[in-house]
Amino acid sequence: MAETAQERLLQESGYSKTAIRYFIEREHVGQLPDATTTVSYKGPCGDVMDFMLKIDGDTITDVRFDAIGCAASFASGEALSRLVEGMTLEDAEHVTEHDILNHLGLLPDEKIHCTKLAVRTFRRALYKYLLEMEGQS
């Protein structure tokens, strides 16, 4: 498959092939109508990310996200979604920005903060769910 101009520009800017693929494919981007919990968070850079989680028992069975932001925001959200889908809540709580970077391979230095946006938004969704469950017991 021939490389597009967009892919070439992203690669020249310091994005890994995985990050570029995640930005373009956006497999986990969209709504999750039967989400167990949903949260929106605006990061310090101004990007906004939404995370929607479907939780069954103590396992994250489905994840969707959306963002108003740059390629790194979408790549980070996609990487995090792929990492936590199928994990227990306890294991997912420990996913870090470093895990996202290791999964993606490379982001431009000035875009590393996007991994924090993904983790912060995801954890807010997770903690919102846990607080709701705590309130029901």
Image: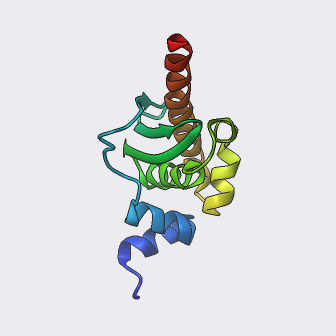
Query: Is residue 31 positioned above or below 27 on the image?
Result: above
Is residue 110 or residue 88 the one in the foreground? Answer: 88
Q: Which picture quadrant has residue 33? A: top left
Quadrant in which the N terminus appears: bottom left
- Visible in this render: residue 20? yes
Query: Is residue 29 positioned above or below 123 on the image?
Result: below
- Visible in this render: residue 68? no
Is residue 79 or residue 115 the one in the foreground? Answer: 79
Residue 85, position in %: x, y? 54, 50
The residue that appears at 40% across and 60% down in the rendered structure is 27
Is residue 27 or residue 34 the one in the foreground? Answer: 34
The residue that appears at 57% across and 67% down in the rendered structure is 16
The residue that appears at 47% across and 35% down in the rendered structure is 45
**Numbered marks: total:** 0
Query: Is residue 12 positioned above or below 61 on the image?
Result: below
Residue 100, position in %: x, y? 63, 52
Specify whether 47 is left or right of 30. Answer: right
Residue 110, position in %: x, y? 57, 48
Quadrant in which the C terminus appears: top right
The image's colour scheme reads rainbow
Specify whether 97 is left or right of 37. Answer: right
